[in-house]
Image (tube, rainbow, N blue to C red):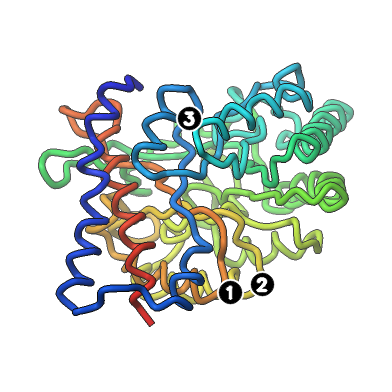
């Protein structure tokens, strides 16, 4: 992303904050209640946008002072050494930004593009070697002062159908199960039942989470995006694509360091009535201390039929969601995830700037909301 283009969007990013300030002034509230200001201050506007110097300068200008970095490397090499990770953290900190999290090379991609495919293919001894490398990355992250790592356990990656048009001609990422072409009918993994998926996930967790607990690194897993009907998709059961599946997931290996990269948009995609149901789901995982990061994005629609929209126009009340996170004691990042695209904004930088301002405005306003 070009720094000049991104910097030119700071006015859009500030829009949400100005709206919050105007609302406070209209209400005759000149100062935040000290107790509320302290409580809402636990949550931070964050991002996983990138960590180049140009992007870090821009994020600092926009007031986004907490980030998840880019993937250090696709394999265990010098970038994943203690020294390499320490240099990354120190460079991020030199911009006044805290490196809150880094991604493991377990990305949300189709299995043939996966960095460590054998973990979800269930192939030993290859998966054992891959898990050993993941464990070493966890140790090195802890020694370098990085407190959390995010990851995916997926075969299909992110599945979508053709995009649809939204406001101002924007393109919305869309999934309509009835229109989805399951071509080929099976992935390279072949048919994978729910029991097989759980075996592979459990095999991973039983070996990795004890290391994370020993080194006090929070492990944040992203749900399957999207959930699909029980019969699966391309022969694959998506067990982390339902709320019940996520509930089972957090109990497989009991640990305060085992939790979720809680993508609010992806979880909303699992629900028949997300505007009503999402809050009980947030409460369930929040009360158990299992939310380690929040992708604060919005959708319009329901399970098997949805669009990813701008945060202020979806079915979920984002302010109400943020109040709930706050009241549950959530203290980590609220960040954008997928954003709509527009022909005049091909890189999505305007949409991300809008999302940062929206999140910062909400966080700021929470000081005035009982």
Distance from Cα at disc 1 to Cα at disc 2: 7 Å
- Residue corresponding to mark 3: 50
Q: Secondary structure at mark 3?
A: loop
* Distance (Cα) linking label 2 and label 3: 30 Å
- Tag 1's secondary structure? helix
> In this figure, which residue is indicated by the disc labeled 2?
288
- The answer to whether residue 61 is left or right of residue 211 is left
Q: Which disc number belongs to residue 284?
A: 1
Dividing the picture into quadrants, the one containing residue 366 is bottom left
Q: Position of residue 342 (x, y in %)?
A: 20, 33
* Count of numbered circles on the image: 3
Q: Quadrant of residue 362?
A: bottom left
- Please name which of the two marks, 2 or 3, marks the residue nearer to the observer: 3
Q: Return the x and y of residue 217 as percentages of the image width and height.
A: 75, 48
For the residues labelled 1 and 2, say whether their Cβ atoms are less than 8 Å apart: yes
Q: Viewed as shown, does residue 295 lie left or right of 82?
A: left
Residue at 63 percent across and 43 percent down: it is 150
Answer whether residue 228 is visible to the viewer in this image.
no
Circle number at residue 6: none
**Quadrant holding the C terminus:** bottom left
The x, y position of residue 203, in whole percent, is 83, 46
Q: CA distance from mark 3 to mark 1?
A: 31 Å
Left or right: 250 in relation to 294: right
């Amino acid at each position: 992303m070009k720094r000049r283009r991104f910097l030119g969007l700071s006015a859009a990013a500030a829009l949400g904050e100005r709206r919050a300030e105007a609302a406070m002034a209209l209400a005759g509230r000149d100062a935040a209640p000290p107790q509320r200001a302290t409580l809402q201050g636990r949550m931070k506007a964050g991002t996983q946008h990138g960590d180049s110097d140009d992007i870090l300068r821009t994020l600092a200008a926009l007031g986004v002072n907490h980030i998840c970095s880019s993937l250090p490397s696709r394999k265990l090499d010098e970038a994943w050494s203690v020294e390499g990770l320490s240099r990354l953290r120190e460079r991020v900190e030199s911009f006044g930004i805290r490196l809150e999290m880094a991604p493991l090379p377990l990305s949300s991609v189709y299995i043939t593009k996966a960095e460590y495919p054998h973990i979800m293919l269930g192939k030993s001894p290859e998966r054992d070697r891959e898990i050993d490398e993941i464990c070493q990355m966890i140790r090195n992250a802890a020694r370098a002062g990085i407190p959390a790592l995010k990851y995916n356990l997926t075969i299909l990656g992110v599945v979508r159908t053709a995009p649809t048009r939204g406001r101002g001609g924007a393109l919305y990422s869309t999934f309509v199960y009835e229109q989805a072409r399951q071509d080929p009918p099976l992935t390279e993994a072949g048919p994978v039942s729910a029991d097989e998926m759980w075996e592979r996930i459990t095999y991973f967790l039983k070996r990795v989470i004890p290391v994370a607990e020993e080194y006090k690194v929070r492990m944040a897993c992203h749900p399957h995006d999207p959930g699909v009907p029980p019969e699966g998709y391309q022969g694959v059961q998506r067990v982390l694509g339902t709320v019940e599946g996520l509930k089972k997931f957090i109990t497989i290996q009991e640990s305060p360091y085992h939790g979720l990269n809680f993508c609010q948009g992806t979880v909303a995609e699992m629900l028949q009535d997300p505007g009503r149901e999402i809050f009980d789901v947030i409460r369930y995982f929040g009360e158990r201390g299992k939310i380690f990061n929040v992708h604060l994005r919005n959708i319009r629609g329901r399970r098997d039929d949805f669009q990813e929209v701008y945060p202020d126009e979806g079915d979920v009340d984002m302010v109400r969601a943020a109040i709930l996170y706050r009241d549950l004691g959530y203290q980590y990042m609220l960040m954008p995830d997928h954003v709509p695209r527009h022909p005049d904004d091909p890189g999505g930088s305007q949409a991300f700037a809008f999302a940062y301002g929206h999140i910062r405005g909400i966080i700021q306003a929470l000081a005035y909301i009982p």
